[in-house]
Image: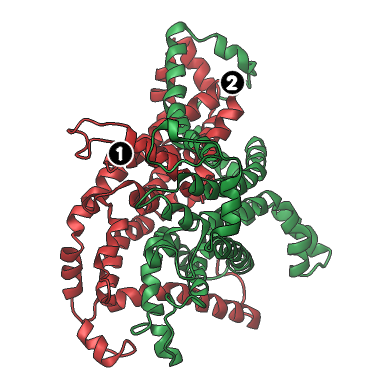
Chain colours: A red, B green
Amino acid sequence: MNTKPLTPQRILLQGFLITVALGWLFPIAWAVLNSFRDYQYTAQHGYVSFGGFTLHNYSQAWQRGDFGRHFLNSLIITVPAVLLTLFFASMIAFVLARFAFRLNLALLGVFIAANLLPQQALLIPLFRLYRAVPLPYWMSDSGMLLDSFWGLILINVAFQSGFCIFVLSNYMKALPHELYEAAQVDGASAWRQYWQITMPLCRPALAALATLEFTWIYNEFFWAVALMTTGEKFPVTSALSNLRGEFFTDNNLVSAGATIIALPTILIFFLLQRHFISGLTLGATKG
Amino acid sequence: MKATAADTAAQSAAKATAAAAEVPTHVPRDKRVRRLGRGDRLVVAGMVLVPTVLVLGLVWGPAVATVLLSFTNWDGIGGWSSIHFVGVKNYHDVITIYPPFKPAIEHNLLWLAFLFLLPTVFGIFLAVLLDKEVRGSRFYQTALYLPIVLSLALTGFIWQLIYSRDQGLLNAVLHTHVDWYGNPHVNIWAVLVAASWKHTGYIMLLYLAGLKSVDPSLREAAAVDGASEVRTFFGVIFPVMRPINVIVLVVTVIESLRAFDLVWVINNGTNGLELISTLVASNVIGEASRIGFGSALATLMLVVSTVSIGIYLPTLMREDKR
């Protein structure tokens, strides 16, 4: 990396890149910085000042935004949705990669295109459908798919599968055929070929996809706002508005809330950056 | 690019299993299906059917229903019998007597043009710079990728600290008193800057991965010919990157069409921030009375996305085979 000599051109390039990178980090840094500052202090001295540091905004934001409950909601929606997406997607991908039907390409297209349609355009019938499907009360206190965690999990799975199928089927097609020939000689069933032979080999791809899908479903905003009617059941991404007053907004408090909500995804990004980036570059369909 | 990345990953997987790959046997694919036993056939059918029913029921079913409903006058209250076919009346109404429609279309087009001209081009430019093995490349990349992991809703809140009228940094620095999110003359531009902040890193990521997979001998050949860096990029690199260029283009179109979260958290897409997506949502969330009308708007979105998907899928699948 350090082999290139430092020419004036290189210095210019570095200067430019540093400026851009710091500029890109700035909005986040600014939000984090002010989340640690007292509102009274910044109101009096202005934001372009120094001092008034406090942790109060965080405890306030956590309480006022009821973040404990909303984080739990996010977990209840995101974890099953990611697992189910990967499970369904890997089954379809396995069949696509392993067997050839006449409709193979069409099937792949159906799933990928579904991933790209604008969600808002499907809302009207989906809203009606969700309202018409009854659920027993032990599954949903609304008594229907609308305003239930089940409904959100299912729509996220339906939407996200396409991307995972595309990535996984490519991955599986590159596995050596000989594996399956040996398996067939041993009389392994299709299910065993999928679950015991293919899936363990796909671990790197599954890890990358799990990282991405966790981030996306955690960040998902529209379906929660549209298909949940009880504010208490909102996942945390859609719950930040709770911190905004109708006439007055304490921006320091909102920053603290935003920082809390961003923390899980930022942690995942730093811990699993490799997975995150390889997942995104494996398939570029995600909008 | 996707294909190559998947291939390398899969190659290492294959190495790990150390499966003997000496005899490349080519069994005709359709024969393998016939070899399946009865039980296996049922299992395979189940594996395909369960997810397919889900996606048909929750995505394609509603998509078709949206198109059909757009030709009716259903108010959402009466039963099936109250649904009447009204032809293209809803479309006619959308265009002639619905004031937010024109600004919404303009904003969606502006969104597309802006995303394309600034963050997309800038993201590509940065990818080209970072492809040259600069020092600190990882830091630069991390800084630019970071906004990708934040939701667009969160992006709206983070930028509020900069745009707020009384507390915002921008007004403090410029000594102005503009409500950047509230003033209908400027708020779309403020929102576009925030959206670009996120879009740039995403495009850079896609493009950088593509550049890494370009055959280095192409560049060497161009250097031997004495071509300048700019000429090398436009004459040699850019054309071989065609599949990624298509992907970047379509991703940008679809992002512009789907834009929603950012303006919804600011003011539910009103007062200068109208988008087709927010108009559709406004017609459903809350009191749902204009089903047919909202569906006509939604159908317009579906048409645009179908066209871009139609361009996209063949490129993706051709890549896939390579």
Where does the image place residue A283, in percent across and percent down from the top left? 54, 45
Query: Which of labels 2 and 1 is toward the front?
Result: 1
Question: In terms of image quadrants, where is residue B182?
Answer: bottom left
- Residue A51 shows in this picture: no
Residue at numbered disc 1: A80
| Mark 2 / mark 1, whichever is N-terminal | 1
Label 1 element class: helix
Q: Nearer the viewer, residue A74 or A245?
A: A245
Residue at numbered disc 2: A100
Q: Nearer the viewer, residue A204 or B106?
A: B106
Which three-letter amino acid code belongs to the residue tagged 1? Pro
- Vertical arrangement, residue A20 with respect to residue B282, above or below: below
Q: Distance between the residues labelled 2 and 1?
A: 30 Å
Q: Which residue is drawn at 49% across and 55% down?
A: B277
Judged from this view, the residue extending furthest toward the right is B225
Which quarter of the rendering shows the C terminus of chain B? top right
Which three-letter amino acid code belongs to the residue tagged 2? Ala
Question: In terms of image quadrants, where is residue A203?
Answer: top left
Mark 1 residue crowding within 10 angstroms, few (<14) / some (14–19) / many (20+): some
Q: Mark 1 lies on which chain?
A: A
Where does the image place residue B15, in percent across and percent down from the top left? 51, 34
Where does the image place residue B36, in percent across and percent down from the top left? 50, 10
